[in-house]
Image (cartoon, grey):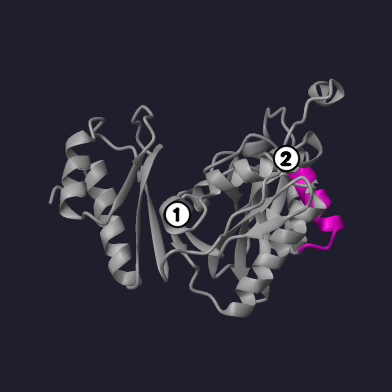
């Protein structure tokens, strides 16, 4: 706010960014606009959680309003007693949501510029384990109507929040359509496939949008793109594994982030593009597993 008051452009602005930083603010804003979302409620006690569960049913999902990512700050509880343990001694704000019965998880990347031009990428499927995204498949193996619904919702949110730059909208696909899970107002892990698999990467697109330049094409470069995250394991030196993967599969693209290797931490990703989805999945998974030391051949 101080920078804006001093005449400095801040993109995205705080009025937009707060909806990605604060889940209670995001839920309030999107619910008021009629955007599909899980049942939710702000809670301050185990009694509040039990009252909510009387309608939504157990188990329910407790989330901290701020600070959670990659499964942190998100707890599934099955009783008021469990909720009491989670909330005990806490000095942060909480919300509770119904535990959505979903078919798969989706994500949509949208870019929007200050003058209102918007570009939406193909809907992707994200495969999560232990609250961490492990794989991304572009485009998601869903029907065209569902994909169009997901893209339309993402575009609506970008306009509603007056987003500048990249917006990632994470969704659940249910029997009744898509519902919004969370927002990220930045280039996002679920969009890393665009570096090697789209005409315009999400990083270039973000710069174009922030600088108010014409946005680039979001088209994919192949019928299928697979991105597999590389998580830190017990082998901090990945260089020899890196060389092996490059030699074994010259079509593979490996991106390492230069981070300190810690178990479970995202330290890189691999991307493969082509016509055969099953082949791409096998190649991407093999490379990621070799890099982390899960396999040795």
Give the quarter of the figure containing the N terminus.
top right
Q: Secondary structure at mark 1?
A: loop
Residue 25 position in % (x across, y down): 79, 43
Based on the picture, tell me whether residue 23 belongs to the magenta stretch.
Answer: yes
Q: Circle 1 is placed at which residue position?
A: 193
Q: Residue furthest front?
A: 214
Q: Circle 2 is placed at which residue position?
A: 94
Q: With respect to residue 127, does 11 lie above or below?
A: above
Q: With respect to residue 200, does 223 lie above or below?
A: below
Q: Residue furthest left?
A: 297
* Identity of the residue drawn at 42% across and 71% down: 223
Residue 145 position in % (x across, y down): 64, 79
* Identity of the residue drawn at 69% across and 29% down: 90
Magenta stretch prevailing secondary structure? helix
Q: With respect to residue 11, does 287 lie above or below?
A: below
Depth check: give the residue in front, 76 or 151: 151
The part of the chain drawn in magenta is: 22-35
Residue 40 position in % (x across, y down): 75, 54
């Amino acid at each position: 706010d101080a920078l804006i008051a001093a005449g400095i452009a801040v993109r995205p602005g705080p009025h937009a960014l707060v909806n990605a930083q604060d889940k209670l603010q995001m839920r309030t804003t999107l619910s008021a606009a009629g955007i599909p979302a899980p049942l939710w409620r702000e809670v301050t006690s185990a009694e509040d959680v039990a009252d909510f569960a009387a309608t939504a049913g157990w188990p329910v999902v407790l989330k901290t309003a701020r600070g959670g990512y990659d499964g942190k700050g998100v707890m599934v509880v099955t009783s008021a007693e469990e909720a009491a343990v989670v909330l005990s001694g806490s000095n942060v704000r909480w919300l509770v949501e119904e535990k959505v019965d979903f078919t798969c998880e989706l994500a949509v990347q949208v870019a929007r510029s200050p003058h209102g031009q918007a570009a939406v990428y193909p809907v992707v499927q994200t495969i999560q384990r232990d609250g961490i995204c492990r794989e991304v498949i572009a485009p998601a193996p869903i029907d065209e109507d569902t994909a169009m619904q997901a893209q339309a919702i993402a575009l609506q949110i970008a306009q509603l929040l007056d987003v500048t730059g990249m917006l990632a909208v994470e969704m659940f696909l249910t029997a009744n359509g898509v519902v919004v899970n969370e927002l990220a107002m930045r280039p996002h892990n679920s969009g890393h496939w665009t570096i090697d698999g789209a005409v315009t990467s999400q990083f270039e697109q973000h710069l174009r949008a922030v600088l108010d330049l014409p946005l680039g094409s979001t088209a994919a470069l192949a019928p299928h793109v697979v991105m597999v995250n590389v998580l830190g394991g017990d082998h901090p030196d990945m260089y020899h594994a890196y060389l092996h993967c490059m030699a074994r599969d010259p079509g593979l693209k490996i991106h390492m982030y230069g981070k300190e290797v810690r178990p479970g931490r995202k330290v890189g990703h691999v991307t493969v593009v082509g016509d055969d989805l099953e082949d791409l999945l096998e190649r991407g998974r093999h490379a990621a597993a070799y890099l982390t030391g899960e396999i040795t051949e």
